[in-house]
Image (cartoon, rainbow, N blue to C red):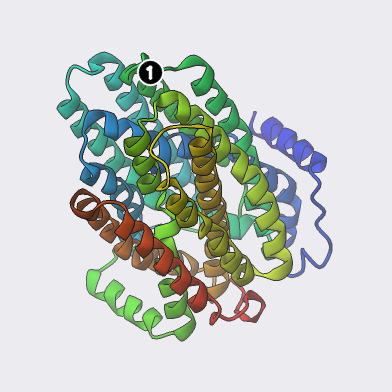
Amino acid sequence: MVDSLRAALAALYRLLPVHASESDLAETDEQTRKALPHNFAAIATNGFFFPTAGRIVAAGLLLTWFVSELTPSAFWVSIIIPIQYGLALIAQPWIAEWLSGKRRRGRFYTYQALLRGVVWVTLGISSIILNESSPALLLVIFFAVIVVDAVAAGVGNIAFSDTLAQAIPKALRGRVRGWRGVFGGIITAFVGIWIQTSFSEESGIRAYGLLFIAAGIFYAIGGLVFGLIEVREADAEKEHDPQLGSIISRIRELWQQDEFRRFVLAQSLITPIVQGLPFFTLFAKQRFGLEIDALGALLIVSAVTPIIANFVWGRLADRLGNRQVLIASAAVGFAAPICAALLFTTETASGWVIALLGVVVFAINTASAGFDLTTKNYILELSPSEEERPFYIGVNDTLVGIPTTLLAAAGFIIDAFGFVPVFVGVAAFTIGGILLTLKLPATEKMPQG
């Protein structure tokens, strides 16, 4: 059955407008060349399921709406990103050291996908059963789920990037990530239409439960599809017992590298804009009283965005390099605080408000797509060898994840002073990130991983 599924994936690859030239495959071994068609298609079609699940339960839209239904405090919304994104990254050096001794690291992506499927289905069932009768209990279950989800994602992030680096030649990595995002956007658009046409103000918490269940199913299927990837395995497993002192010492050595240090700082400055959608949507929901049907329209925008953004960013990254696309992505994201300033000029919900909020969603998701694609590919090129690659990925993600946890302070700022200081801060950090990215070396000058 596995061979039949791989043959079907290879047939799909031949239908895609992707041409791998001989120069694209330079220094690629025969096994990787032979498996490229079904490996490329497996990563791309993983996008139908896994990124779709991620967009359904993204902090910026559905989760912000859900938590704001349970509590009026901005603080609880503000800690979603530090948990969902920051916690997934902080333990990654240890995870990377542990994974580096495994024969086939990609299988751990499948394991974490199945775990995430179970916990989101559990939250969905809990939401349907409890509905609005126990908001405090539902909030506890919710945060327990996103903690488990974040830890699992930490394993998945490394396993995915490492497997992609083994399976896909450098010249095709931007395109495979691009197609993965495009396919995810298509399915997410249908989910958005489902929300807009089937849910209303009267739907209540149960509507969120159905969406959580759908996300869990998509996570599980996406993990199983990824399991069809075929890569070269190590001869034997290596026993790794990562020691904290050794890990800290290696992190310090990496931090001494100018290129690596600048790259981490640039990402940290740009992160508030690519992860800042919860604050913009919470502002709109509180100021204009938007209901779940508006969420459907915004989710459609969120779905269409990666179809466009990943196609464009993927091709540009392969042609111009990751640094240039990272700069362009951050510049697009800067449109979000500009639109927020315009939203302050009106106090009543209207088509103009939805349009401006749609631009905010488009700008941030476009920036996020470019940020995700370029930074993940750039760190692969920074890594000096296949053996070091998981550790480079893990350390980079951890160092970026630490300042991400500071986004929780935005909730306190919003509750105390309003949204203006947060939006001004996001804009300032974005400008700083662009300026620092300009100082990074072009990817063609980096050692190939």
Does any portion of residue 33 appear in the rendered image? yes
- For image coordinates 49% across by 67% down, the residue present is 389
Tell me the quarter of the picture where residue 258 sits: bottom left
Tell me the quarter of the picture where residue 426 sits: bottom left
Image coordinates of residue 55 in percent, x first then y, are 48, 38
Label 1 element class? loop
- For image coordinates 33% across by 60% down, the residue present is 404
Viewer-side residue, 359 vs 274: 359
Does any portion of residue 64 appear in the rendered image? no
| Mark 1 residue type | Glu
Q: Is residue 446 above or below residue 375?
A: below
Image coordinates of residue 434 in percent, x first then y, are 51, 72
Quadrant housing the N terminus? top right
Viewer-side residue, 1 vs 153: 153
Tell how many labels: 1
Q: Which residue is mark 1?
A: 201
Relative to residue 418, is residue 179 drawn left or right? right
